Amino acid sequence: MLEVTNLTKSFGKLKVLDDVSVRMHAGQAISLIGPNGSGKTTFLKCLLGLVMPDGGAMTLQGKSIVGGWDYKRQLGYMPQIGRYPDHIRVGQLFEMIQEIRRGTFEKLDEELMHAFGVAEFAHKTMRTLSGGTRQKVSACLALLFDPAVLILDEPTAGLDPMASEILKEKILAEKAKGKLILVTSHIISDLEELTTDVMYIMEGKVRFYQPIDTLKSRTGEQKLNRALAKIMTTQSVTTKQ
Ligand code: ADP
Ligand code: MG
């Protein structure tokens, strides 16, 4: 569904993505993990068209997306830190984005908005919202247009436990619909609950990319955090196509 071939990106002398080639399919939920500064966000931003790669190819459903616009209607993105105009009210923000997207989507998915009770804080300005409430707004926007691909950067960070559970349930429901989901998180237990595969990026290279079940059986571990610890110490570098 989404295919990346020989993707490279440098910032000045720093090679941030070094010949990355991966295939991602509908129905997969992929954990993107790796140390700080390893290139995870840059990888996601290349897919989103927010960073222009230096080289390589990216296709969605067989069509090139490099430099394209139209494909973006198929993506939902929840940034790690959502930035919004300070003085816009929550309700106005949702109206504005729907207006911008008019004619580019098939149906609205307001399920998460209802679950988070957005109507109760729709009159508030973005400036006055707590970090967690902003995250709720970002999550609702990422899911609103029923995208085929969900890209979630630290989706549960900053959410209270109840909100975190609501969001995870929604992500699981989207996964069950057969969407492609990419998630970064430092909370391994969340990734274990939500995802089917793990992609480990280090120094701009994909060190391994495997189903979680394979990782567990190869290492003989039941828990993802222990399996990851084991595989990282044995320096295994196989990748899945
Ligand atoms: P991660 O998300 O894995 O923590 P990033 O993809 O954000 O890593 O960053 C990878 C490296 O690229 C870091 O060293 C970071 O400082 C650098 N970097 C990211 N964006 C830019 C940019 N716009 N200009 C210069 N350097 C950048
Ligand atoms: Mg990052």
Image (tube, rainbow, N blue to C red):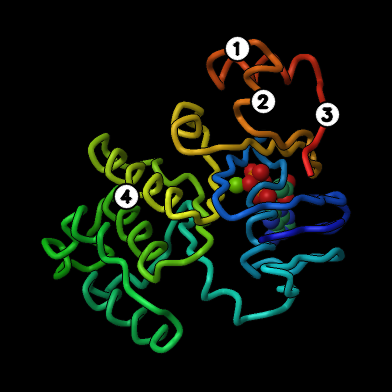
Q: Mark 3 points at which residue?
A: 237
Which is nearer the N-term, disc 4 or disc 1?
4
Along the line of sight, which residue is nearer the eye, 32 or 179? 179
| Residue type marked 2 | Thr
Residue 83 position in % (x across, y down): 42, 64
Foreground label between 4 and 2: 2
Whether disc 2's CB lies below 8 Å from ligand 1 is answered: no
| SS for dot 2 | helix
Whether disc 3's CB lies below 8 Å from ligand 1 is answered: no
Which is nearer the N-term, disc 3 or disc 4?
4
| Residue type marked 1 | Glu
Residue 169 position in % (x across, y down): 32, 43
Q: CB under 8 Å between callouts 2 and 3? A: no
| Residue type marked 3 | Val
| SS for dot 1 | loop
Residue at (80% x, 36% y) in the render:
239
Q: Mark 1 points at which residue?
A: 221
Residue 10 position in % (x across, y down): 83, 57
Foreground label between 3 and 4: 3
Which is nearer the N-term, disc 2 or disc 1?
2
